Image (tube, helix red, strand yellow):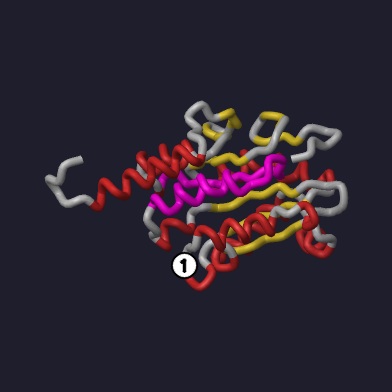
Amino acid sequence: MSIPDKPVHLAGKPLTHACHACAFFHTDEEKYRVLMPFILEGFERGDLAAHIVNPAHRAAHLAELAHAGVDTAAAKAQGQLAVRTWDETYLQDGKFDQERMIASLLALIAPENAPPGKISRNIADMAWMNGARPDARQIVAYEARLNQALPHHHNPIVCTYDLTHFSADVVIDIIRTHPMVIIGGILQENPFFVPPEQMLRELEERSLASAMPAGAPQ
């Protein structure tokens, strides 16, 4: 992310470098309360808001933006608002494909998609995992590979997770794949972040171990 003249604020902190964060919430109310200042700051400055949402909640998401004071019709017409749904991104053809999704996300956050001289502020709702039921290791691997694919200077990306739908072991792995984390409404540098190459090796070792017959020598 090229640093604008004014700092970008996310969950109570100014960003000083590229940000790929996981954000954990218990309710939609909490999610909007924490992320709306980041969103509104972007609209005030002319940045692009690129959001990936549940198809069933697209209208509700636009209503939340409108309630906060965003003229969504004008923002879309001016190229300042792009709302994509899960079936247009994560679940094209009804299934999750890591490589396709990484390519789709890189295209979405490409600098040329933002208004001239502005950045994109990207938020992705990850609750699609609950219905699609992919192997959790696919998601962890995707997040790790995304870190490899992102340009060194990229615009902020926030992956949101509903804590009521994920087991503790999955949450721990998700945290380990994000350089930054929002917990309790505050953005923090993540001390538990694992470099993607190391994380992918660990996932491969887990897959090999799970494929071994019971009682086989390790």
64 or 79: which is nearer to us?
79
Q: Residue at x 16, y 42 (%)?
A: 217
Name the residue carrying label 1: 95
Q: Magenta segment range?
A: 136-164
Q: Residue at x 39, y 51 (%)?
A: 136
92 or 129: which is nearer to us?
92
Q: Residue at x 65, y 38 (%)?
A: 19
Residue 160 rendering spot, x and y as whole percentages: 54, 46
Residue 55 rendering spot, x and y as whole percentages: 56, 65
In the figure, is residue 194 to the left or right of 42?
left
In the figure, is residue 43 to the left or right of 160?
right
Q: Is residue 29 magenta?
A: no
Image label count: 1
Q: Residue at x 48, y 58 (%)?
A: 128
Q: Is residue 163 magenta?
A: yes
Looking at the rendered structure, the kind of residue marked 1 is Lys
Locate the N terminus and report the quarter of the image it occupies: top right
21 or 195: which is nearer to us?
195
Specify few, some or many for label 1: CA neighbours under 10 Å numbering under 14, 14-19, or 20 or more. few
- Farthest residue, direction front: 217
Locate the C terminus and report the quarter of the image it occupies: top left
Question: Circle 1 — which element?
Answer: loop
